[in-house]
Image: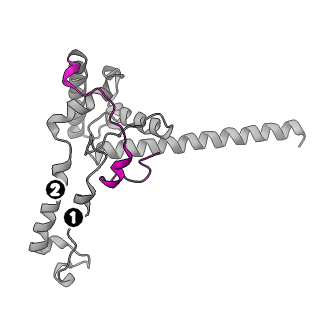
Amino acid sequence: MNELQKQKAVEVLERKKAKERKQRLAMMYHLFAFSMLHFEHVLLPYKILYDIERQEYEGIFKEIKPNPYYPHPGVTLETEYSKPPFRGDYKSVTTADGTPDFRLDEEYRKKLEEYQQRIEAEKMKVDMWGFWYARFLLPYDLESFSDFDYWGEKPKDDNAKEIVANLREACIKAQADCRKHPEEYNLEPVPRLEEHKTKYDVGYGYIR
């Protein structure tokens, strides 16, 4: 192999590595956006959540990311650490397949329900969704978004199709109203603060 052939081989290898890296990053952005929408119920279109994760990785997005507790970065540590430990008889909560189901302990089940109520109380109220999230919608042409752009996958059944249709309608309506009545919405970025680390469960890598 002469020098020219070696150079071309190196270039091919570098292009392959760059492509693989791009694919890995795309999968990382996808997993974040998909999980936030489908599992954390952050009701913003998949495409927007994807863009936010990409921008954060690139160091462009430096504010608090949309999350279930927005405009806070997470649940308070006080609530997080208030989860009650189980101190009962493990035999009494062991199921037939050998796994524990702590809900079988009536007293502990009530404590867990109280803990979950504290978690739910800190989440963003549904009626504040537009106030906090409409500004994330403003730069986008929502009318041109496909079902995939909204949902991160093609809706698999009628129920999913209905959810996507409702999300589309709500986002387009919130965007239009925000443009018409900006004074009724929060249009300012919500900054990340160093002191959040001592108050909220902000997760790994929050402050960069």
Q: Is residue 153 left or right of residue 162?
A: right
Residue 154 seen in this snapshot: no
State which quadrant residue 76 falls in. Answer: bottom left
State which quadrant residue 62 falls in. Answer: top left
Residue 167 seen in this snapshot: yes
Q: Which residue is mark 1?
A: 82
> Principal SS element in the magenta part?
loop
Q: Are there few (<14), some (14-19), or many (20+) residues within 10 Å of tag 1? A: some
Residue 81, x across and y down, in percent: 26, 63
Q: Amino acid at mark 1?
A: Ser
Q: Which mark is residue 118?
A: 2
Q: Could you say which is closer to the camera, residue 128 or residue 154?
A: 128
Q: Is residue 117 above or below residue 141?
A: below
Which residue is drawn at the image coordinates 21% and 79% (left, top)? 94
> Mark 2 or 1 closer to N-term?
1
Q: What kind of element bears circle 2?
A: helix
Is residue 162 one of those drawn in magenta? no
Is residue 184 one of those drawn in magenta? yes
Q: Could you say which is closer to the camera, residue 170 or residue 12?
A: 170
Q: Which mark is residue 135?
A: none
Q: Is residue 191 above or below residue 144?
A: below
Image: magenta residue range: 181-208
Q: Is residue 14 above or below residue 88?
A: above
Q: Is residue 183 above or below residue 198?
A: above
Residue 205, x across and y down, in percent: 44, 50
Q: Are there few (<14), some (14-19), or many (20+) residues within 10 Å of tag 2? A: some
Residue 194, x across and y down, in percent: 39, 47
Which residue is drawn at the image coordinates 74% and 37% (left, top)? 11
Residue 198, x across and y down, in percent: 33, 55
Q: What kind of element bears circle 1?
A: loop
Tell me whether the residue at label 2 lies in contact with that at label 1, contact meaning CB atoms closer than 8 angstroms.
yes
> How far apart are the two marked residues, 2 and 1, measured between alpha carbons?
9 Å
